[in-house]
Amino acid sequence: MAGGRTADLAPTAAVKIFSAGTAGCVADLVTFPLDTAKVRLQIQGESRPLLEGQRAKYRGVFGTIYTMVRTEGPRSLYSGLVAGLQRQMSFASVRIGLYDTMKQIYSRGSENAGIGTRLLAGCTTGAMAVALAQPTDVVKVRFQAQVRLPESGSVKRYSSTIDAYKTIARDEGVKGLWKGCLPNITRNAIVNCSELVTYDIIKELILKYNLMSDNMPCHFTAAFAAGFCTTIVASPVDVVKTRYMNSVPGQYKGAANCALTMLINEGPTAFYKGFVPSFLRLGSWNIVMFVSFEQIKRAVVKFQQAQQSPL
């Protein structure tokens, strides 16, 4: 991405892939409770629409977190974390780590890539990442949506991450692990374009006009803007993706049918369910991820240089 102005800050593609995957895991560890709250709010009303006057179980992001801790225990906030970390190591490493490489390929090595080239690079790495990491995303969403009520004695949908992979493959076929792949590709094309391209352009402009140096304040500002833009654009697709991946076999005929069912049963506002936690999560995730990404990338390059330099 923009900003590598000195020779000692020219990481290879391998360094970027490693740094992006690691930074994605760090960001997930910090923001996972917000993501779980977002999923619970998004699927609320899925089984049966709320009757008039009936109070919703989850109300707002912090209300959802409080309800989950009170009824299911603190561990419920990190349900699906293992799959989430598996997802980031395979997903973030591709969609973020390969972004600069694809941008160079599409611009034929030019240092001044246009917005069209950047959007195309974002779409490409987003689609590649989904094709590779979709099973981990399906398992993560299933775990986050799984309600744990110890006092009810109800049987959990899945007992472990490995059990989830096996159960989904056995009951729904291997294609069940790629359930919702098309809406997820659509979502991640949108997310990548709004997230990476926004970050890339804002960081480039900040450095071009010498508003900040290429350090944490610059990364923080660009990451915050990227998170806000991404939430506005991607929320409707994200809700449909979550509903469809969490659905039982036969509940929806496809992603389009899922969206239509939501519109008919719950109205257009259903597409922005969980918007506040989505923004809190995406905003904070982007800040932690991009700041971590830049610092890890520099640390690895410095380590490589130290190893290569004579004693």
Image (spheres, rainbow, N blue to C red):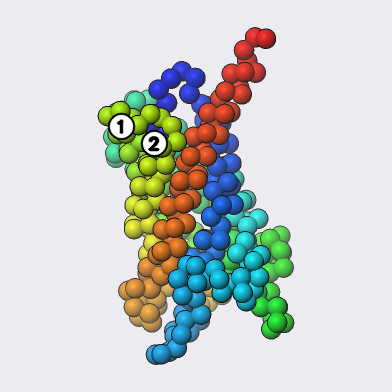
Q: Which amino acid does label 1 sit on?
A: Leu
Marks 2/1 in contact by CB < 8 Å: the verdict is: yes
Q: What residue type is labelled 2?
A: Cys
Identify the residue at horizontal 45%, vertical 63% (top origin).
277
- Picture quadrant where residue 248 is located: bottom right
- Residue 61, visible in the rendered structure: yes
Residue 191 image offset from top left, x and y in percent: 40, 51
Residue 285 image offset from top left, x and y in percent: 48, 50
Q: Which residue lies furthest to the top in this view?
A: 310
Label 2 sits on residue: 218
Identify the residue at horizontal 64%, vertical 73% (top origin).
72
Mark 2: secondary structure: helix
Q: Which of 309 and 265 is in front in this view?
A: 309
Q: Nearer the viewer, residue 288 or 7?
A: 288
Residue 211 versus residue 277 in the image, above or below: above
Residue 67 image offset from top left, x and y in percent: 56, 74
Quadrant of the drawing holding the N terminus: top left
Q: Which mark is residue 211?
A: 1
Query: Is 132 positioned to the left or the right of 115 in the image?
Result: right
Quadrant of the drawing holding the C terminus: top right
Q: Residues within 10 Å of mark 2 (few under 14, many from 20)?
A: some
- Picture quadrant where residue 300 is located: top right
Identify the residue at horizontal 38%, vertical 73% (top origin).
270
- Residue 177, visible in the rendered structure: no
Mark 2 to mark 1 CA distance (whole Å): 8 Å
Residue 135 image offset from top left, x and y in percent: 59, 57
Q: Residues within 10 Å of mark 1 (few under 14, many from 20)?
A: few
Identify the residue at horizontal 59%, vertical 55% (top origin).
84
